[in-house]
Image (tube, helix red, strand yellow):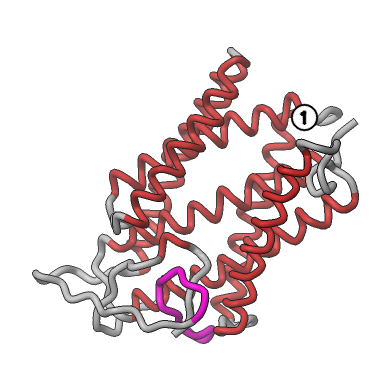
Amino acid sequence: MRTTSNPVFKNLPKGPGGYATFGSGSAGASQAAYQYGQQTAPQYTPSAPQRAMTVDDVVTKTGTTLGVLTVTAVLSYFLTNTNPGLAPILVFGGMIVGLVLVLVAVFGKKMDNPAIVLSYAAAQGLFVGGLSWLFANVMVAGISAGALIGQAVLGTFGVFFGMLMVYKTGAIRVTPRMTRMVVAGIFGALVLMIGNLVASFFMDGGFGLRDGGPLAIIFSLFVIGLAAFSFLIDFDAADEMIRQGAPERAAWGVALGLTITLVWLYIEILRLLSYFNQE
């Protein structure tokens, strides 16, 4: 059984059954758990009969979650545009609240709680809207805010649907080795980002991973690649849950996991685009 690089899929319920799959199934199957290595997850035994999760459930819950995120992001952007002083409050407030909700969902095993998932979407919407305003109006020049944000949104969903097609056709197989490489890459990128942040306190630009130079562009492309391959592993985890007959509520956990990766990918694409438009 393979593992997923997304922490939200840890301990999402599974059950016996043979239900319609998230993709074609040709790319294999993975357990929905966040671990570095391989381990068999316990099977979910419902206390009462529950309808099994389907592809429609995943699509509906994910669409609802992204809808809430989009509405709050637009609201956050226009509030920030009206009062720029709100930018740090919305960005850091949304980021911290979102992080707390993810921790509660993961460690409290509440990934299938719709209230937590939708609250996370609202918090991330505030974060994304405020940060988008900062990138489009403070950090770059020579391009309209709408064009920059529009390009980032198109790029994000382009990668998402592209990787979905890759998964459905089985062009890239999700294997334990690939999963370990992606997880190792994510941890490595995180260590580099933290190191660059610490170094920036002592030298201008730190190690140059976020200063807009050639090294920063390469690093952003690397991170975007990690996010893209994370989608493959997440699709595979969702596919396995559907095949095993996880209860319908588990679709909220899948929606949460996919939303986390989408937000991560959007911010990284937005950052990369900003490099090409800096003065």
In the rendered image, residue 159, in percent from the top left (x then y), is placed at 65, 60
Residue located farthest toward the front when viewing the structure as drawn: 202
Magenta region, main secondary structure: loop
Which residue lies at the image location 57% right of the left edge and 36% below the top edge? 128
Q: Secondary structure at mark 1?
A: helix
Q: Which residue is mark 1?
A: 139
Q: Is residue 217 above or below residue 179?
A: above
Magenta stretch contains residue 240: no
In-front residue for pair 215/233: 215
Q: Is residue 23 left or right of residue 78?
A: left
**Residue 86, picture quadrant:** top right
In-front residue for pair 21/214: 214
Which residue lies at the image location 90% right of the left edge and 30% below the top edge? 279
**Label 1 Cα crowd, 10 Å radius (few <14 / some 14-19 / many 20+):** some
Which residue lies at the image location 62% right of the left edge and 61% below the top edge? 227
Q: Is residue 180 left or right of residue 1?
A: right
**Residue 178, picture quadrant:** bottom right
In the rendered image, residue 156, in percent from the top left (x then y), is placed at 64, 52
Magenta stretch contains residue 33: yes
